[in-house]
Image: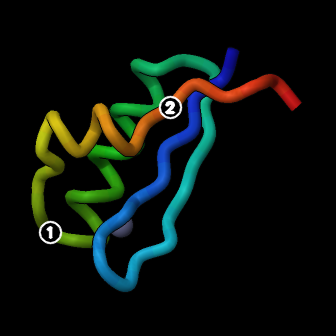
């Protein structure tokens, strides 16, 4: 089942979907680095990443 990540930082509506949690986490970290010039806390990554039903 795919994973969906949604960034909950203030003013950011970035979201992504990936087939694996590992890939989704990698892309989420890349997003935080590029868009927020910051690292994403593991707790936030856990909370903002969820498994979703295949469309
Ligand atoms: Zn963001």
Q: Name the residue under label 2.
A: 50
Residue 37, relative to residue 40: is it above or below?
below
Q: Where is residue 49 in the image (x, y as percent from the top left)?
A: 43, 36
Describe the colour scheme in one phrase.
rainbow
Q: Where is residue 19 in the image (x, y as percent from the top left)?
A: 64, 21
**Residue sitting at x 60%, y 31%:** 18
**Ligand 1 occupies quarter:** bottom left
Residue 19, relative to residue 36: is it above or below?
above
Residue 10, relative to residue 32: is it above or below?
below
**Residue sitting at x 28%, y 39%:** 45
Quarter-of-image position of residue 28: top left
Q: In front: mark 1 or mark 2?
A: 2
10 Å neighbourhood of mark 2: few (<14), some, or many (≥20)? some
Q: In this view, does 9 lie to the left or right of 48?
A: left
Q: Sequence order check: which comes first, mark 1 or mark 2?
A: 1
How much space separates mark 1 and mark 2, taking CA atoms?
Answer: 23 Å
The answer to which of 44 and 25 lies nearer the viewer is 44
Q: Identify the residue at the far front of this view.
A: 47
Q: In which quarter of the image is the C terminus?
A: top right
**Residue sitting at x 50%, y 72%:** 13
């Amino acid at each position: 089942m795919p994973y969906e990540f949604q960034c909950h930082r203030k003013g950011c509506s970035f979201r992504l979907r990936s087939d694996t949690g590992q890939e989704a986490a990698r892309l989420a970290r890349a997003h935080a680095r590029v868009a927020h010039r910051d690292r994403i806390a593991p707790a936030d990554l856990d909370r903002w990443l969820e498994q979703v039903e295949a469309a």
